[in-house]
Image: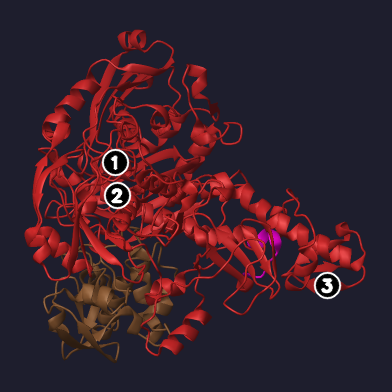
Amino acid sequence: MSELRHISRREFLKRTGQAGGGLVLALTFTAGCGRVAPGPAGQNTASVAPNVYVNVRNDGIVEIFCHRSEMGQGIRTCLPQIIADEMDADWDRIELIQALGDAKYGDQNTDGSTSIRNQFDLLRNAGATAREMLIAAAAAEWGVPAGECSAREHAVHHEGSGKSAGFGDLVDAAAKLEAPTEAPFKSREDYRYIGKSMDTIDGFAFTTGQAIYGIDTVLPKMLYASIERCPASGGTVVSFDDAKAKAVPGVVDVVKLPDPTSPVLFNVLGGIAVLATNTWAAQKGREALQIEWDRGANGTHESAAYRKALVKSATSSGNPILTRGDVAAAFKAANSVHEAVYYAPYLSQAPMEPPAAIARITDDGGCEAWACTQNPQAAQDTVAATLGIDKEMVKVHVTLLGGGFGRKSKPDFIAEAAWLARETGRPVKVTWTREDDIRHGYFHSVSAQYLKAGLDADGNATSFLHRSCFPSIMSTFDPSATGPGGFELDLGLLDNPYDIANMQLETADAKAHLRIGWLRSVCNVFHAFALSGFVDELAHVAGQDPRDHLLKLLGKPRQVDPADDGAKYTNYGHPLENHPIDTGRIAAVVEKVADMANWGRALPDGHGLGIAVHRSFLSIVGTVAEVSVDKNGKLVVHDVWTAVDAGTVINPDRVTSQMEGAAIFGMSIALHGEITAKDGAVVQGNYDTYPVVRMSETPDAIHVHIMESTAPPGGVGEPGVPPVAPAIVNAYFAATGKRIRELPLRNAGLT
Amino acid sequence: MAIELTINGQAVSLDVDPDMPLLWAIRDVAGLTGTKFGCGKALCGACNVHLDGQVMRSCVIPVSAAVGRKLTTIEGLTEDGNHPVQVAWRELNVAQCGYCQPGQIMSAVALLERNPNPSDDDIDAAMSGNICRCGTYTRIRQAIHKVAEDRS
């Protein structure tokens, strides 16, 4: 077995010295894993592995297996922080090893901002059981009660006798013991690393070009593949001529991939692959292909017509999923009614590293792959299904991910590499071009939403209807899905925190015509855009300050349970008792972020402040944006303030960086992001037609405050995104008096 | 045919088509993977290298254009990885996923060499060709200022 191993700075210097100039890959392999892990050849090192996440070597090094994927959120720093803290291990004596995809690690799907919020206790337990095992070994050696011993600074100590032994010296004795399955956790005041802004563990590799991503892995005799896929989702090859492609120097083979399946799942998407001795030859050969396509059932998908259908569906009748009071009666009794339609387009995740994977067929007919995957176990499943072999025959190495944002949860590109490796009999690297990525992804859903409020004579909302209409992620798994369903409704629709006496939340049907997937914060993006925009509208209708109105609408501090109003709400997989929808905590975030922005101050001419708050993935984020419109009519975002209540925080600097990044990601959604379809095909293709925010549009500052909390940890990677776009459109209204209800703002001529 | 290059101070002979984009020659043939592919159309800066000290988009220039010139990739920026820009990047923990950062660093180094104390506007002008999807721009800006301040 082999793993991708963290390269320390010391190792790097040693190796670049040996290579004499830096022509070296930082991909190394170490044989073995588990209870005994031999080091480099000839240096067998005894060790003890109390669980699958920790292996203590007798040279004193604590190996920590990171079973979650690193895509910029900092898990390769935060995960060892937790384990090392519970062990009281020294930070410079841990070695981080990226784990293979393997069910023994439990959930490895690095998605849904789950690594810390779902696994904090699991990781603490991994460290604590290792600590207790070393303590037990020392106590047995010294003939003293384990309860009199403690771990401190990479050693076990017995205060009474003054004895101490380093972790490495205890390995042989510990290896004779059974590991405990449970152990007490350290108390908060004893934390050494949890709650500290430890430097990014891969910082040296990141800044020297030594970091290895999916696109970087190299195998001997490897072929490079580039794949032409049907422009329309689900379409198939009728015929093709590869004579010109095969004439391109360097091209070795041309292979037709299996047609797309229904449901599409994470399976290969069909098309024709050109395989060559380098990437460029493969791409040139691909350009020389002549292919006749059958665009299939989605070949007439066209965004303008589809938008009309979505809006019509959203403004017609809906399917109630939460009912409080009697909205119909309350609308009739209202002094006035305010209504609006919000629209947001398809989006592409567009991570800087496009999907890329390497696969080879092993001598026993299995498959070994290296890939930038958020979900290595799903990769095992998909590759196994594609090749018709057992999952246990598929070994998936997780490289660093050059961004993920949900795209790399889907292992279709790994299945492509695996299938082509078997077809050609050689290792194959599949590299998607940027155009492939933007045109053939799993798209964030386009949406239309209808919102309506009944107001009393003072402008206070007495009734509220929110109807959401979008093609569902479920369509990727069930082609008969005709609209939103399941977990999607929990993402910013059912968890409405506002204290309005009569409320109805509804869905409306929409059939999918592209592969629908998820993007950083998923349906929260468009639900927060519509809800926080509409709430701001209500403030202005009532002539109230948007911050004060928001606090009033949140009502008195209370815990909201959508089940009280008949909804099936899953709260991101956690009981509401542990992670309540707490309007007091939401209000505290609103007050904090408003204070940070000095809300209510006199602003320069033409400037406006906008505020939005949104709870997602068990965390609450409030955002204020300050904007103006320059002399060319372009929107300028001057400053962004963010307050985040993520409960207990592991690494404040990584939380801060996620909020900074979310502000930029959210700005890209607000200002630029739009995927459209024509004749079933995605129109955009690269960062020119699918722009994202650059340095020139970056705010002067993104100010982040983390709320002090001892609550269980919430998510961090995603919750910063949803409030950004509504804060910007609300600020734009404050600056100009113009209300924008559709994204991106580019279409309003503002970029 | 053989193309003779000087990469990071080392003479290298590559058997490639002279029209091959420099990026793929560096990555696939020379085996230096620190220079990244992001767009293939000079839109994102992930592939930035230095040719005679100037920032170039290696994805759109042919490998033949590097013949007889001093080609520096992220791996060759320094022997020990401690260029002041690299150090500042680490001190501020700029990188998130890290993928675009070699290109960002190559742009920042070139900026600071021609303008030791850049303003925010100078940074916008020099760095807006580099996309970071993680959104590390404010820290990149801070890191560039830090290098300038530490030098003065």
Asked if badges 1 and 3 are on one and the same chain, I answer yes
Residue beneath disc 3:
A164
**Nearest to the observer: residue A133 or residue A543:** A133
For the residue carrying disc 3, how many other residues have a C-alpha within 10 Å: few (<14), some (14-19), or many (20+)? some
Q: Residue A663: x and y, percent?
A: 35, 52
**Quarter of the figure with residue A135:** bottom right
Residue A342 in view, yes or no: yes
- Residue B18 on image: x %, y %: 12, 79
Residue at horizontal 67 percent and vertical 74 percent from the top: A45
CB within 8 Å, label 2 to label 1 = yes
Name the residue rendered at 39%, 77% in the picture.
A208
Query: What's the residue type where badge 1 is placed?
Result: His
Q: Is residue A656 above or below residue A340?
A: below
Element class at badge 1: loop
- In this orientation, which residue lies closer to the viewer: A566 or A339? A566
The first of marks 1 and 3 along the sequence is 3
Name the kind of residue labelled 3 in the image: Ser
How busy is the neighbourhood of tag 1: few (under 14 within 10 Å), some, or many (20 plus)?
many
Q: Which mark is residue A444?
A: 1
Q: Which residue is mark 2?
A: A349
Measured in 3D between alpha carbons, the distance from the residue under mark 2 to the one under mark 1, in whole angstroms, is 8 Å
Indicate the chain coloured brown by its letter.
Answer: B
Q: Does residue A88 belong to the magenta stretch?
A: yes
Give the overall secondary structure of the magenta segment. helix
Q: Chain of mark 3?
A: A
Q: Tell me which chain appears red.
A: A
Q: Residue at x 11, y 76 (%)?
A: B19
Residue A182 placement (x, y as % from top left): 74, 48
Label at residue A593: none
Q: Is the residue A485 above or below the residue A284 in the image?
A: above
Give the magenta part as a residue range: A84-91
A563 with respect to B146 (left or right): right
